[in-house]
Amino acid sequence: MRVLSLLVALGALWIAFPARAGSILRARLNSDIVSTDPGTRRDENTDGVLLHLVEGLVGSREDGSVAPMLASRWSISADGRVYTFTLRPNVVFHNGAPLTSAEVVWSLQRYLKPGTRWRCLEVLGANGIAPVTSVTAPDLHTVEVTLARPAPIFLTTLARADCGATGIMHPDSVQADGSWNAPIGTGPFQLGEWRHNQFVQLERFARYAALPGPRDGNVGGKHALVDELRFMIIPDSSAARAALIRGSLDVIDNLYPADLMGIRGREDLQFQSVPVLDCYSLLIQTQDPVLRDVRVRTAIALTIDAKALTKAITRDTGSPNNSPIPVASPFHGPAEARMRPVDIPRARQLLKASGYDGSVIRLITSRRDPQMFDTAVIIQAMAAQAGLNVQIELLDWPAHLARYTTGNYQLMVESFSPRLDPTLSFGLFIGDKRQEPRKVWDSPRARALLDEATQAADPAVRQSLMDQLTLDFLAEAPAVVLFNSSRLSVVRAAVTGHQNWPSAQPRLWGVGLH
Amino acid sequence: MNGKIGIALIGLLLLTIVVGLLWMPYDPNAIDLAHSLSSPAANHWFGTDEFGRDVLSRSMLGARISVLIALGAVGLAISVGTALGVLAGYLRGWTDRLLMMVTDAVLAFPGILLALALMAVLGSSGSSIIFALAIAYAPSVVRVVRGTVLSIREREFIEASRVAGDNAFRTMVRHVLPNIVPPIVVLATSLFGWALLSESALSFLGVGVPPPAPTWGNMLSASRPYMDVASWLSIVPGVCIAGTLLGVNLLGDALRDWLDPRRRS
Amino acid sequence: MTLLRFDGVRIETSGRMLLEDLSFEMASGEMLAVVGESGSGKTLAARAILRLLPPAVRQTAGRIELLGRSLTQMSAPELQKVRGAQIGMVFQEPMVSLNPAITIERQLAEGMRLHRQLPSDEIRRRCVAMLERVRIRDPLRCLKSYPHEFSGGMRQRIMLASVLLLQPKLLIADEPTTALDTLSQREVLELMVELARDTGAAVLLITHDLGLVARYTTRAVVLEKGRLMEVGTTQQILTNPRNPYTRRLVDSLPRGYGDVAEVPDSAPVVLDVNNACIEYPGRPGLFRPGAPKRVVQGVSLQVRAGEIVALVGASGSGKSTLGRAVLGLKPLAAGVVRFDGVDLTSMTAEQRRQFRRSAQLVFQDPYSSLDPRLRVQDIVAATVRNAPDADARVQAVLEEVGLASFGTRFPHQMSGGQRQRVAIARAVISRPRLVIADEPVSALDVTIQQQVLVLLQKLQSQYGFACLFITHDLAVVRQIAARVIVMSAGSVAEQGPVATVFRNPQHEYTRELLEATPTLHVPTEATRVSR
Amino acid sequence: MLGYILKRLLLTLPTLLLVSVGVFLFIRLIPGDPALVLLGEGADAASLAGVRADLGLDRPLPVQFLTWLGHAVRGDLGRSIFSGEPVSTLILQHFGLTALVVLTAVTLATLIAITAGLVAAWRQDSAIDLAVVGAATVVLAVPSFWLGLVLLLLFGVKLGWLPFVGYVPFSESAVQAALFLVMPIVTLTITESGVLTRMMRASSIDVLQLDYVTHARAKGLPESTVLIRHVFPNAFAPTLTLVGLTLGHLLGGVAVIETVFTLPGLGRLMVDAVLARDYPVVQGCLLFTAVVYVVVNLLVDLCYPIFDPRVTAR
């Protein structure tokens, strides 16, 4: 018994452990960040953390539109090829150096070098749809970027979070030989200590020059209200939930619906759910001998009760949706809102007509997130009602990606990360399978409509094109979109100012502890 | 005495499997999203899981699959391990040194990781788990068998068989093999327990038998997020695994005493 | 004054009677033997004195008194004071009589430190003196080393030293030399008796060997299956035993006088060994191969059909190795072995298969030489398995060895003697021309030994095979062999007809061996332990 | 002695080479490669090929292996594809924690096994014996991660005595770190003590029947001395071999327990590396585990003669 009492004493001491001098906000990451080099070696968690450190010329507002950040304003030449940015005055880097056009040019040129492996090189690089030909600095506060051809998508690409928001950094961020060192950005926080697989610690940047006005998406007024921001790496979600309840954690930004058990309804926790522009869908390989027949594809689609599935898997936080355009997107009109009804008898009829002999159809899924796994289990059960012999093949994430990238699957559950622009949402599905085997919908007509929509600037024209694409998508059923999930966040009562938003990134500026 | 408890527990397990073949309260894979996570009640004696599937039916089907996987893995590991162990122990010389080097190399891999990697290569299916676990366990079988054969090899009846004109192969089959049955039987019982535990550990690390097929292992690891709200989801498979292992270990002890002539006299 | 008294002592285990109503007395300084075959309860009686019975065994009645004080009623702490200080005990198995994990010094000193509060240098001095007394070379090095570095004989002597250091009043010796060969047996026993006499200790000798009783003890207690058969002086027990069991025990001692008829020269030479040498590979070092150790050096011998030739020598003299080499189981480093005139190394495949059936081996340990998983009939049929009349021949040979109805039994369901008969049946079933018997009876009780020897002689006279009989017991040689070959340290010391070699041995080693073999002749008081 | 150690180490080189070749080929057999994981689902063929070239994965396998081996021999295990951290520092960082947990747990388990095993064998078939055997058998039956989860829920969440998330290293605060490790160590100690106790009891029963134990008693030594000085050293030898084998395995990382208690140990590092196809990290870790396994077994063999002098190190 003596040992037990010692433990209790130590435990009590631990609770009363005085918080360190400054206030610490502890947020949870479900896996370690990949690197501190924005937009290159990254994943969602990495983007989220680094956006507290670096800022781009422009950023995206809450509704996804582009807004000024380090550039106070910009002008586009008549032929739409030359963008001239004017930099905001008295902005300072974390190492105290002032922001000038020289650092902007250095940063952009570094991103465009193939060696950097920048994620958005695919768009702004030589063979992208908006290739950048030159970046110059006419004077200390102006930067001119010239494109090979006009592309309205240039600014949204600069603001893309998965490209590190094209964060402008000071040349000291790299070592003499050009290899990466640490991000010296202009954000409200600066990098403290990164201890692998344990935590990433950020400290408040006292000399941060905040924009006036309230916070809006990645832009607007960004104020660090705590001295230290500690991203704690807790892979196990029930452990994270338990830590939140115990009070050793303040913010869980990205919660799985399954973890809502025991949280919703607690008065000492604030829960928020915001629809996200992602897309959970069942991909169907149209080149597969069995699934080539549209009747079989339609039959599969008819067995899936998207409403019941979404309710069960997202615990009422997701929104069922049969269109590639997310429910929360401004382009989600009446055409997109149409849901395919469940009709088992019709599905059986179609299958008999198509001569389906009950052979095995493999459905690939993985445990990248619990929703993907649960979706496959429910689809398998629902398809069985119509006599479809679906068998689940569970792979780990890299193997799943390999099968997706090479199109080597019959059925596959896939969750696409958020795309802010409707053409990008359809872009996930539409493509020529000969060049891009990962594309799902190989139809020349659809490709033409998509190209037209990408070029069109007038929203009304883009909306009618989107409606047409949705109609064709439902008719040909190259895939069955199931639902858009919501971003669930939960914070302790003591946390003030936390506002969840559709982007996949945590946003902890403007958040304090009282 | 504890042999009786062991037999009782194993008997209960076999009964569950046999009954499971004929009748199960519900279809183990039928989902009922409206009644997910309902606690044990009259209609569902062991409650339902996150998809509304009946936990009792899944444990009965799970029993069959988990036991089959464990038996398959142990059977393969024992047969391969025994063959190599006898060769290494009896022939000595280069065969022994070579086999020992290979077994050491495989033993140097942490068991679970070896199985994890094998599963990733073979794809996760029942048969690939059996193969992965067999490879993870074969080396320890080879070591035990080799040790026993080394001691039997010195016994005079082996020399007698050579005097009677038997060649090496015949001596191994007629005289060495029958005499290493007792240690192998005891090893098989403990390996069976380990196979059950490893299968659940593999499911815990996210590999293992593909859904929707239930095994006690994947039921246990799937119950993790609901442990504090739906505790029956982890208690049922946990108790099943622990009960079976307890039965197997007790049976193993009883077998060892019964087969060991010294203890019997 | 009676030192030790047994009064109606009964020992049982879970309902089975092991020792019933044993009563006898022992005076201080006396040498008393407790004689009986295995299973007679003699060891249990000895262990009951210090209450060291195995876990499931209890003394359920009677009293054991030491100098009038009842050991049976004594409390555990009191008994611990008696153990070692008053009564010392020496055990049978030299391999496990000393703790292999700790040095000799700690094992010797721990008794002293417990019972005699002496300073450690005084203890060390006494240990060295006692080790010298038991003729251990270089006692200081011996103190630092571990038990596995000594031979069986030396280990028993070290154990004697450790027990007698405490100068107990009574020394219990539980078959102290059964596992040793004749020479080291004599050495250990003579040393024990001398030391007991110096310290005035009485010796309770537990044995099954009547020869030892004759030579070393004054009175004897005879036990059979847990019951007291007879108590009396050694002279009276050995010359005219009153109890029928004792009489049978005495009669079964090998009594031959070397008068076995020799085989005529006309009989064909079945086995001809010429200048045979055998080596064991040394232990290889890191980079150099180990130096081979020569075990058998230039041995030549012949065995004719129908003849039993005894091959005698101490353990380690190479006789078993030679026995194996003659059957081709061990390669020869030099020299030639011919079977029916054919050199073993140049045999054709057919000749080799023929040789396998016509040269057989009978092993020493009945528990290890039969495969526990096979029935007797399968064991015996080994060499004639695929002969058409195999079953008939198996039944016939089983009848010949007196085990007609034992065909379906397993080895563990039979006694030592019965198993050795199975081994003999296995050897003779294929009508071999040569049988090597490697100490076939030394692991058996005296009465059973006699039956097996008689059986072997009957079978030989019936089938006329040549037999090379390996043993360390000269009494057995005198009973069954016509010629004898004495080996010492790997080479032949002397060979010839049994009668001539035993009457006037030429070689010093043979003389010593004869002297060490106890016979039934009871030395008068004067000649006992003259040296 | 030194010659023996040298010989043993030389003998393990082929095994280690076999392990590295096995690991090198093995992980490349697993579908999916680091380039895919890096670029995620949006990757097109061109950028995939670019990343593969960049990582040198397009070079022939033998060349890749020999360059890796060349560096490995000089102690440079390369860098993680994802974090760019040198693999050797990653391993040492994570191994420190695993070693601490495993060594403490196995030591405690061994101490428990020795006392429980000896007492149970000494009082064979008594109440204590049945209790010890019963407990050991039950402990063997309980899956380790289930035990871990129950402890975490009980002491971590419900009672809140012990922290179980956000591991804090010793450098920062010893008390905090120690408290954090209590539950994983307790879980591992319980699971490992089962098999060790059964082994110790079995070998103690065998030794208790040997003559030198009766001889020791015949000298009048009290039971405690007989047990400690005469029974323990001889009975512990086989158990020591088992401890060696267990240590060799567990030091390779207790992935399952590290997952339950979110401990950044070697097991966790390896599982994540395999799941992310971080080839250099996987190869480095597995080679390191093999070396640890070999060294631990050698150490056990070296201290074997203490308990059984007959097995002298030639």
Image (cartoon, helix red, strand yellow):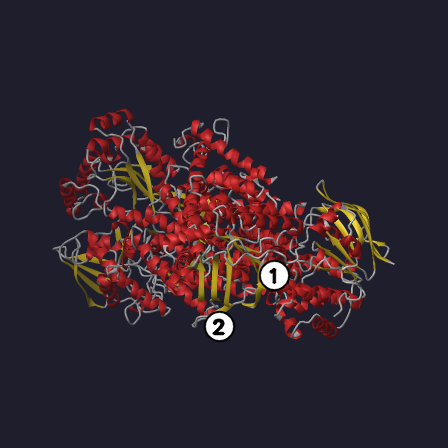
Whole-number angstrom distance, CA of label 1 to CA of label 2? 56 Å
The residue lying toward the viewer, choosing from C271 and C512, is C271
Q: Amino acid at mark 2?
A: Leu
Q: Amino acid at mark 1?
A: Val
Q: From this viewpoint, which residue is outermost toward the right?
A: C1
Chain bearing mark 2: D
Kindly identify which residue carries mark 2.
D2
Chain bearing mark 1: C
Q: What crowding class fits label 1: few (fewer than 14 Cα within 10 Å), some (14-19), or many (20 or more)?
A: many
| Percent position of residue B144, x then y | 48, 52
Is A223 situated left or right of C496 in this image? left
| Percent position of residue A114, x then y | 22, 62
Label 1 element class:
helix
| Percent position of residue A14, x then y | 56, 56
Same chain shared by disc 1 and disc 2: no
Q: What crowding class fits label 2: few (fewer than 14 Cα within 10 Å), some (14-19), or many (20 or more)?
A: few
The residue lying toward the viewer, choosing from B206 and B106, is B106
